Image (spheres, grey):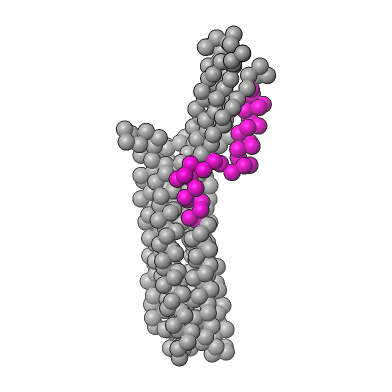
Amino acid sequence: MPMNSNSEIQLKKRTAKLSIYSNGLLIVLKLFAGFWSGSVSIISEAIHSSLDLLASIIAFIAVKISHKPADKDHPYGHGKFENVSGVIESLLIFVAAVWIIAEAWQKLFSQHSIANNESLIWGIVVMAVSAAVNFFVSRRLYKVAQETDSVALEADALHLKTDVYTSIGVSLGLVIIYFTSWYILDAIIAIAVALLIIYEAFLMLKKSFDPLLDTSLPEKQSESIREMIKIHLPSECSCTSLKTRKSGQNTMIEFVLITPENYTVKKADEIANHLKLQLMDLAKNIFVQIIIQPKRV
């Protein structure tokens, strides 16, 4: 699929909207079950879903902006808007997780109980439904994120994947409370959910923030690039100053091609174009800049 094709953009937008709709529904269900039962763990999950909804909205906006063509103020395109959205989502998650821990900590040392067994059962059902919905939506998000190399959608998928685990954890905790009346588990589970959310936010922050600093590609990818250059580089030529970075879904590669002094401009240009085409076949959305430099004796 060609980069920035209309079909790719529409696919990413539809997928981001799917996440928005599913999170909106789950927030309503979780808030209803949480306030009816008085369960802080369910309410913490509702907050988690609210962040998921915000993340989905940010991802949707980032997807739209990142596909805008390069302009005078952004000559390298708008790809890094997806990375910016991931950073914003991560910081919001940190704040919410701290709030959840503070609320749960207070409940941990107070006389806290669930309203009644009927509300508890509804809470268990809602959390099970939430886990199932987010499981399928996150799989869809990951699939599209991999197809389109979208940081924003991958970050959104990570949100929902974590929500699956936390929802299952809360649901199992409520089942134990139902049979044992160990209400203290409710606050403990809420704290565990918050800690998992913090870990999730840290991973997302690192993945999103590194490209903003023009960090090099992972060593495995860089090695593939070096190997491809080596295979297609004439023996009398060499390359140096290899630089790589990521900008949203785009991969940037730059290096210096050193050619013999007796090479014509045309011949050097043909070699550079051949190398560029081979590198662009490694993956989608690769931009290659080659600086040709005659060998100095």
Residue nearest the observer in this picture, 64 or 257:
257
Residue nearest the observer in this picture, 91 or 26:
91
Q: Residue at x 49, y 60 (%)?
A: 201
Q: Position of residue 26 (x, y in %)?
A: 42, 68
Quarter of the image for residue 293 reads top right
Decide whether residue 73 is among the magenta residues: no
Q: Is residue 12 visible?
A: no
Please tell me whether residue 293 is drawn above or below residue 138 in the rendered image: above
Decide whether residue 223 is among the magenta residues: yes
Residue nearest the observer in this picture, 125 or 95:
95
Quarter of the image for residue 173 reads bottom right
Q: Residue at x 42, y 44 (%)?
A: 80
**Which residue of the protein is positioned furthest toward the front in this rendering?**
297
Q: Is residue 25 left or right of residue 121?
A: left
Q: Is residue 289 visible?
A: yes
Q: Residue at x 59, y 16 (%)?
A: 295
Q: Position of residue 212 (x, y in %)?
A: 45, 45
Residue nearest the observer in this picture, 15 or 257:
257
Please tell me whether residue 107 is drawn above or below residue 272 in the rendered image: below
Q: Residue at x 37, y 33 (%)?
A: 75
Q: Position of residue 25 (x, y in %)?
A: 39, 67
Instruction: Check the picture and name the quadrant holding the C terminus.
Output: top right
* Dominant SS in magenta: helix
**Which residue of the protein is positioned furthest toward the left in this rendering?**
72
**What segment is highlighted magenta in the picture?**
204-233
Q: How many marks?
A: 0
Q: Position of residue 96 (x, y in %)?
A: 41, 68
